[in-house]
Structures are given as C-alpha cells and as structure tokens.
Image (cartoon, rainbow, N blue to C red):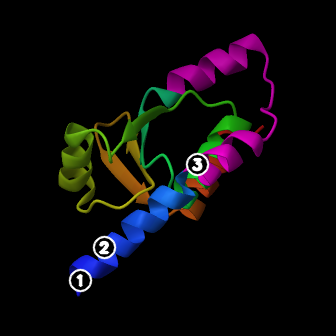
Amino acid sequence: MRWVIRLFFRLLRRLLMPFMLVYAALSKPKPISRDDQAQAQVDTDCRSLTLYQFVTCPFCIKVRKEIHRLALPIGMANVQRDADARKALEQGGGRVKVPCLKIEHEDGRTEWVYESSDINNYLRQRFAP
C-alpha cells in the first residue's frame, strides 16, 4: 500500500511540475536595488548561505521568490538531483526536508533553518533595507 501512495504522489508531482515551473517564472517579484557598496556587502554576506531545495517544491519556490526579491546571490543545492547535497543535508541538518537554509556563522558554527516562513523571516531581518 505504501508504494501505491508513493507512486501516486510521484505521478502527481510529474503532472504538476511544468505548471509549477511556469508559475515560479511568471510570479517572480521585482528585485530591490541597492547601491554598489551595499550590494557588495550583501554579496559577501551571502557566501555563508546555502539553500537546500527541490526545484518544484512550492515552499522552495516561496523562498526562492523572496531571495530574488531581496537580490541575494545565495548558493542553491538541489537535493533531488545531487546525492552529495542530499547527504550533506541529512548529516548536517539531521533530516532530508526542504527548504533548508544552511547558515555558516563567523565563529565556525553552522545553523540549519527549516520551514519556508522561518527562512524568509531570517532573510528579511538580515537583508531587507
């Protein structure tokens, strides 16, 4: 019975995937603009961030839209396609659940933030003008 449920959701995801990708592309918000110095600082700060995500996950789309709106060059790791990224997420974060934002602090600590709303709140607090 379990495999039937998995098969159903895989088929559903494959059927909806093109629509989700079109929605993600068409609903991107306009990015904010910063002066060159401020954007250079944001670019530097974003080197310590990585978003672990699936391309068609609606919650990941929500986070990517916020990243686009805030004009953040955050590294993306596709957990569906990249086995190394999946393994890193499982070992570091403790579970394979997306979206997940990996934050490497200056003191060497690594923080894993799950939940799209929590990630978006963190990004707004840290990078919104």
Please tell me whether residue 53 is drawn above or below residue 115 in the rendered image: above
What type is the residue that disc 2 sits on?
Arg
Name the kind of residue labelled 3 in the image: Pro
Q: Which residues are magenta?
A: 18-45
Residue matched to label 2: 6
> Closest to the observer: 117 or 78?
78
Q: Is the C-beta separation of discs 2 and 1 under 8 Å?
A: yes
Q: Residue at x 25, y 47 (%)?
A: 86
Mark pair 3, 1: CA separation: 26 Å
Residue at position x 23%, y 51% in the image: 92
54 left or right of 31 in image = left
Q: Residues within 10 Å of mark 3 (few under 14, many from 20)?
A: few
Q: Position of residue 38 (x, y in %)?
A: 70, 20
Q: Please tell me which of labels 3 and 1 falls first in the chain.
A: 1
Using the image as rendered, state which of residue 98 and residue 106 is in the foreground: 98
From the image, tell me which residue sits under label 1. Answer: 2
Percent across and percent down for residue 99 are 45, 55
